[in-house]
Amino acid sequence: MKYINWIIIASAIALLAFWGFQKTDSPKENGIVDIFEGKIDNTSLEGNILFGNITYDRNCKSVGNGLLHCDAGVKTEKFGVINFDYTHNMSKQPCLVDGDKILLKVKKDKKAYAIR
């Protein structure tokens, strides 16, 4: 019976910790990575996973509801500078910044995810 009580308490603590993690507004505040969804618009790299550094983030324009649409340059060793076109909520996820190190995962139809 004692073990069941400890299991219930441990499960409750884990659930509360997970719920708190999900409610975080800014992933960077808790040491969690930012994931940006967008597309590669200057080349075809379907299926590649690349490491790179942000070299520029420009042409950010409001698209409504607190969202910005931006173009970022990702310098990679294998393909040079790749343009990553993405939309994000500035209040929850600041723009990519020159010098940021990212992992870029390119999917079908030039869809891509940048992980900072």
Image: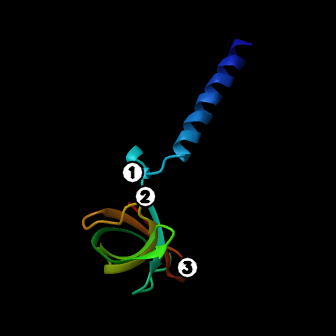
- Asked if marks 3 and 1 touch (Cβ < 8 Å), the reply is no
Image point 49% across, 47% down: which residue? 24
Ranked by sequence position, the earlier of labels 3 and 2 is: 2
Measuring from the top left, give residue 3's x and y in whole percent.
Answer: 69, 16
What residue did someone put label 1 on?
Answer: 28
Few, some or many C-alpha atoms within 10 Å of disc 1 (few <14, some 14-19, many ≥20)?
some
- From the top left corner, tell me how far across and down residue 87 is, in percent: 46, 72
Q: Which badge, 1 or 2, comes first in the chain's sequence?
A: 1
Residue under numbered circle 3: 108
> Secondary structure beneath disc 3?
helix
- Mark 3 and mark 2: Cα distance apart in space: 21 Å
Spatial CA distance of label 3 from label 1 is 28 Å
Q: Secondary structure at mark 1?
A: helix
Q: Amino acid at mark 2?
A: Asp
- Residue at label 2? 34
Q: Position of residue 60 (x, y in %)?
A: 36, 76
Q: Is residue 98 visible?
A: yes
Q: Is residue 13 found left or right of 33 in the rendered image?
A: right
Viewport quadrant of the C terminus: bottom left
Q: On screen, 26 above or below 6?
A: below
Observer-nearest of 66 and 112: 66
